[in-house]
Image (cartoon, rainbow, N blue to C red):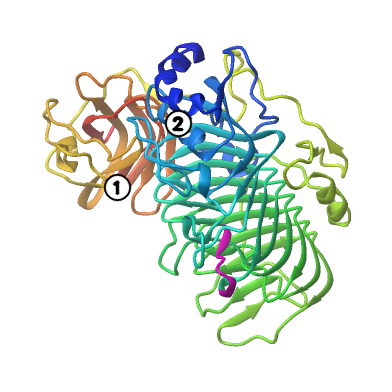
């Protein structure tokens, strides 16, 4: 349950005071409405949905230091907050700020080991000039209506490894909407990617955004072995004057629809290392090799329908280049779990021109090639059930019966806090526990042979009851999500025979402590 925003705002005032004294943070009245418009789309609606800072306090920031101060002034690292940004954010006004609810760094907007945050450009606009946004070990993040430009990995000044927006290390549920991400050249000029995801980043949507004038648009997976990423949606974006990576996919699933690609100079959607892309009703113009597997012999796959190829050229196939054209056909099928409306490809250039990018009035398509202003985000206190999470809460108050199969099993996880241990969750001792190094993380129970499980009991340690927020249960053998929900307790899953089951905490309040991860056959 989220606490009232006014209480959180009062708790934040001490940390915000330094920035406020210089006029770089304006604390907003508790009743002030956030500037975010519309709701998340695509894969960001899955895994419990993406709401960012909805329900929390709203603050105004005009420097990077003020953004960090707002994060650090929260009651906890998961306390919801909306940060309205106006003006130019650069190296000169972005310093590190310390606090129990943040982990920031100078020279980059650092969203690290936190959750439930919205950053939205307001007023005359928000420009992150030569300064990147880095999301790491975090969940439930919204970035809307901002421009990020000319972020360098070499030369001076440098920021965020040269990426405009990057996500890495167990990131979940990010919605990036109506942004402008741009560079002024390729790698030789000091720039890297505009929108990168790696090291177990999942459930992301990039919508109504402009990516241009860069050597690299973005990637999913940093190498052929980094295939833990995926479930990413790209829709109604403009990709203009890019050399490659629009995007590059290594493993995982991507849904790519109603995007306008113009002047892709070397390659476009590069599906490799087992990735599967559903490519619907896009418009490709004046470009080369817009879809296929390029620069590797590790094949990827695609399902295509309704796309328009206008003055597109194709290379001859080779051992490391397998273009999908000149007559692209599907070589896989991809099932999409959410609803969406497709604009016809013929109107994509027009609708994207009217809607994509920052400071476009946050207009969206109605699915009939007509731009619309979306309705404001619903009040999160509204008792109406969340339409993005129709699945009933799988927790069951009935204690399971039978033998706890976790006793004597093995255990591992994504990280562990000082004083905790993976093995503590399967020792039958409620006085010992595992905690992740941050507010999110995963813990697994594993066996030498496949074991049949249909119920799980997550028991929190004394003093931490209620800390666990949203979570997922994953089949460690296949990576399949068996169920998701929120709060500790008994969890029913489809009867599963596996050598490993993983309980992944994707949001929390305070420090989650799992005393026991019990498993039962029935």
Is 241 on the left or on the right of 249, as rendered? right
Q: In this view, does 392 lie above or below 300?
A: above
- Residue nearest the observer in this picture, 422 or 134: 134
Q: Is mark 2 on a helix, strand or loop?
A: helix
Region rendered in magenta: 188-194
Give the x, y percent position of residue 278.
Answer: 65, 57
- At x 45%, y 31%, the residue is 69
Element under disc 1: loop
Q: Crowding near pointer 2: few (<14 within 10 Å), some, many (20+)?
A: many
Q: In this figure, which residue is indicated by the disc labeled 2?
A: 69
Residue 189, magenta (yes or no): yes
Residue 313 spot, x, y in % from top left: 78, 79
* Front residue (pair 133, 227): 133
Q: Can residue 503 be seen in this view?
A: no
Q: If the image is split into quadrants, where does the C terminus sit?
A: top left
Q: Is residue 100 left or right of residue 12?
A: left
Residue at image location 49% in from the left, 69% down from the top: 273
Left-right relation of 483 to 255:
left
The numbered mark at residue 463 is: none
Q: Using the numbered discs, state the Cα–Cα distance from disc 1 to disc 2 in whole angstroms.
A: 28 Å
Q: Name the residue under label 1.
A: 414
């Amino acid at each position: 349950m989220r606490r009232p925003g006014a209480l959180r705002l009062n708790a934040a005032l001490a940390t915000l005071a330094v920035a406020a004294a210089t006029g770089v943070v304006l604390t907003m009245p508790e009743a002030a409405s956030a500037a975010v418009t519309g709701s998340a789309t695509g894969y960001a609606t899955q895994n419990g949905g993406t709401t960012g800072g909805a329900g929390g306090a709203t603050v105004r920031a005009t420097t990077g230091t003020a953004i960090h101060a707002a994060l650090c002034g929260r009651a906890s690292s998961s306390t919801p907050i909306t940060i309205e940004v106006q003006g130019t954010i650069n190296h000169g006004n972005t310093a590190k700020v310390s606090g129990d609810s943040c982990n920031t760094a100078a020279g980059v907007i650092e969203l690290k080991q936190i959750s439930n945050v919205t950053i939205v450009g307001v007023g005359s606009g928000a420009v992150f000039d030569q300064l990147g946004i880095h999301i790491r070990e975090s969940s439930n993040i919204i970035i809307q209506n901002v421009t990020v430009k000319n972020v360098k990995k070499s030369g001076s000044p440098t920021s965020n490894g040269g990426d405009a927006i990057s996500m890495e290390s167990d990131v979940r549920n990010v919605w990036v909407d109506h942004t402008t991400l741009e560079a002024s050249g390729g790698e030789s000029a000091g720039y890297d990617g505009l929108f990168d995801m790696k090291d177990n980043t999942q459930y992301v949507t990039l919508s109504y955004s402009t990516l241009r004038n860069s050597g690299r648009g973005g990637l999913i997976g940093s190498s052929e072995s980094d295939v833990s990423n995926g479930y990413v949606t790209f829709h109604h974006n403009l990709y203009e004057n890019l050399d490659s990576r629009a995007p590059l996919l290594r493993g995982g699933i991507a849904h790519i629809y109603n995007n306008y690609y113009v002047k892709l100079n070397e390659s476009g959607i590069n599906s490799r290392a087992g990735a599967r892309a559903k490519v619907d009703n896009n418009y490709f113009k004046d470009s080369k090799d817009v879809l296929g597997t390029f620069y590797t012999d590790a094949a990827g796959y695609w399902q295509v329908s309704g796309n328009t190829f206008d003055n597109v050229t194709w290379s001859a196939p080779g051992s490391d280049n397998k273009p999908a054209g000149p007559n692209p056909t599907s070589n896989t099928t991809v099932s999409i779990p959410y609803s969406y409306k497709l604009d016809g490809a013929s109107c994509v250039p027009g609708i994207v021109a009217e809607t994509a990018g920052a400071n476009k009035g946050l207009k969206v398509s109605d699915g009939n090639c007509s731009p619309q202003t979306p309705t404001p985000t619903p009040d999160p206190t509204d008792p109406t059930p969340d339409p993005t999470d129709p699945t009933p809460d799988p927790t069951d108050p009935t204690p399971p019966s039978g033998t706890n199969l976790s006793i004597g099993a093995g255990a591992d996880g994504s990280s562990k806090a000082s004083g905790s241990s993976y093995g503590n969750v399967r020792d039958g001792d409620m006085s010992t526990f595992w905690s992740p190094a941050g507010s999110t993380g995963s813990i697994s129970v594993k066996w030498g042979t496949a074991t049949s499980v249909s119920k799980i009991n997550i028991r929190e340690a004394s003093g931490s009851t209620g800390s666990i927020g949203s979570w997922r249960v994953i089949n460690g053998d296949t990576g399949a999500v068996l169920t998701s929900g929120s709060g500790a307790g008994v969890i029913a899953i489809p009867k599963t025979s596996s050598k490993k089951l993983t309980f992944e905490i994707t949001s929390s309040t305070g420090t989650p402590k799992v005393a026991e991860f019990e498993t039962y056959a029935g």
